[in-house]
Image: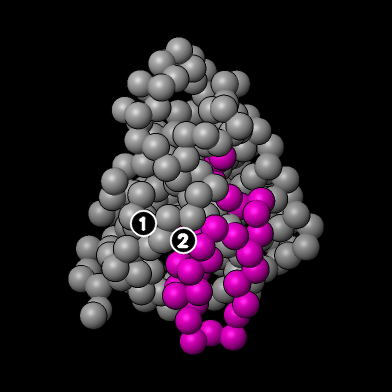
Amino acid sequence: MSPWLLAFRHPRLYTPKSPMLRLLLARHGETEWNVSRRYQGWGDSPLTPTGHGQARLLARRLAAEPIDVVYASDCQRAWQTAEIAVAGRDLVVHRDPAWRELSYGEWEGQTAQQVKERWPDLFAQRGADSENVAPPGGETRLQLRDRLLAAVERLQREHSGQRILVVSHSGAVGLLGSWFHTGAVAQRSDYAPVNCSLSAIGWLQDSHAIEFWNDGAHLVEQPEN
């Protein structure tokens, strides 16, 4: 898989070697609910053996990347992926609920077909307007956006000049890709990363650039046993 190379908003001001902040974003490895195609959200489905192997391949991909700080969602599939990805380094994985996936509330653990059968009207409404319509007990995509942008702002305040790895989730990483590319909350599938792919955003003052997005080239290799 080739990297998706992108640069936006005053890209000439950005050089990967000297950003005020460089953010590496990774999605967690494959989980049991990924395999059975269930809504995960804040649920804690464990990594599969394939997911553990993907995390080891991510570690190999990151071996040449300088990293100062590591954050992960406090869902186990994210922080376990992060711990595997930086194993052997003198780095602590900070578990932060701000980096969780969108909450699907009562839909978590259900398949799309099960949700459609039980909540047909709400399922259709959310399909037409996920920015403003939430699953019962869950979040809208605009609420997810606000939570994630607040988390990014904290990184900018607390880690200026540093290189940060964040391991999060498909919906969360995909939303940030959409927002920093277009300034809008696009449909999840437009920017959704594959398991254990890597993306990078850099900032210089008030300008930013996406260095690459959903880079999964390292996942073509076979995981080590």
Residue at image position (41%, 61%) is 46
How far apart are the two marked residues, 2 and 1, measured between alpha carbons?
7 Å
Figure quadrant of the C terminus? bottom left
Amino acid bearing label 1: Thr
Q: Is residue 55 above or below residue 130?
A: below
Q: Where, by quadrant of the figure, is residue 119 drawn?
A: top left
Position of residue 46 relative to residue 189, above or below, is below
In the rendered image, which residue does mark 1 sit on? 31
Whether the magenta-drawn stretch holds residue 94 is answered as yes
Q: Amino acid at mark 2?
A: Arg
Percent position of residue 176, x then y:
55, 42
Q: Which residues are magenta?
A: 74-103
Q: Nearer the viewer, residue 49 or 130?
A: 49
For mark 1, does the 10 Å Cα neighbourhood hold few (<14), some (14 to 19), or many (20 or more) residues? Answer: many
Disc sitting over residue 77 in the figure: 2
Find out whether the residues at labels 2 and 1 contact each other: C-beta distance under 8 Å: yes
Residue located at (25% from left, 73% from top): 223
- For the N terminus, the quadrant is bottom left
